[in-house]
Amino acid sequence: SYGCDVVIIFTEEEEGLVVKSWNLMKKDAAEWGLKFFLKIFEIAPSAQKIFPFLRDSNVPLEQNPKLKPHAKSVFVMTCEAALQLRKAGKVVIRESTLNKLGTVHSKYGVVDEHFEVTKYALLETIKEAVGEIWSPEMKKAWSVAYDHLVAAIKSHMNPQS
Ligand code: HEM
């Protein structure tokens, strides 16, 4: 598993900041999810080629029905990671789920740079969504949760060649 026995200190305040901002976005999750991924593709157009359902489709990007669910998964799983970091000091995901996530992301050629661009776009999207309650502390809390989630996924991916 990832991270050995290291316990991450993630405070109740940090958890609260993630939950509070996610609650503001949740009812429009599909729309924010779409914005999120459009940001990713704006920064890294080649990332579109990673997604089979975008590669093989004639539908305009923003109308592709499969894009929003993936975007929402990233949000929801990052938020869940924050809850677990607070509760257990680590990201807890079922081994079978992690194996699946590791396999899928390796298979489609997702590399470190994709996770980095995605992190940047995620934070930018939350910033836009929450408006004036955005703060360095909120950014930090989402960053830490995302980084630990990605570390867990990467620990189940094949090494990059
Ligand atoms: C599939 C989550 C980052 C590309 C998936 C699935 C989930 C998921 C839940 C479905 C797995 C299944 O089939 O059961 C996440 C999370 C991420 C993340 C939580 C970050 C924290 C990324 C990034 C990329 C990416 C950065 C590429 C830019 C894909 C692709 C698939 C996939 C290509 C397969 C699409 C398909 O099923 O057709 N991801 N993902 N993911 N993800 Fe991600």
Image: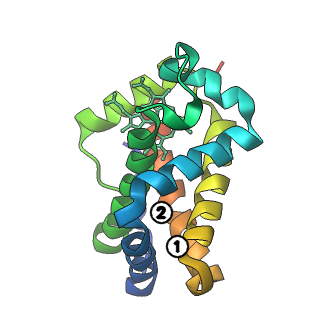
Q: Is residue 67 above or below residue 52?
A: below
Q: Position of residue 29 (x, y in %)?
A: 40, 57
**Quadrant location, ligand no. 1:** top left
Mark number displayed over residue 46: none
Give the quarter of the image for residue 110.
top right
Q: CA gap, disc 2 to disc 1?
A: 6 Å
Label 1 crowd (10 A; few <14 / some 14-19 / many >=20)? many
Q: Position of residue 83 (x, y in %)?
A: 32, 69
Q: Is residue 3 visible?
A: no
Residue at image x 47%, y 36%?
67
Q: Is residue 93 above or below residue 124?
A: above
Secondary element at image label 2: helix
Q: Position of residue 27 (x, y in %)?
A: 35, 65
Residue behind mark 2? 145
Instruction: State the scheme by which the image is colored.
Output: rainbow
Residue at image x 44%, y 69%?
8
Q: Position of residue 33 (x, y in %)?
A: 49, 51
Residue at image x 52%, y 67%?
142
Whether tag 2 and tag 1 are in contact, CB under 8 A, the answer is yes
Q: Quadrant of the C terminus?
A: top right
Label 2 crowd (10 A; few <14 / some 14-19 / many >=20)? many
Amino acid type of the residue that numbered disc 1 sits on in the rendered structure: Ala
Secondary element at image label 1: helix
Q: Nearer the viewer, residue 87 or 142?
A: 142
Q: Nearer the viewer, residue 55 or 61?
A: 61
Give the quarter of the image for residue 125.
bottom right
Q: In this image, 66 relative to 80: left or right?
A: right
Q: Is residue 64 visible?
A: yes
Residue behind mark 1? 141
Amino acid type of the residue that numbered disc 2 sits on in the rendered structure: Ala
Q: Is residue 89 above or below residue 81?
A: below
Question: How many numbered marks, from 0 up?
Answer: 2
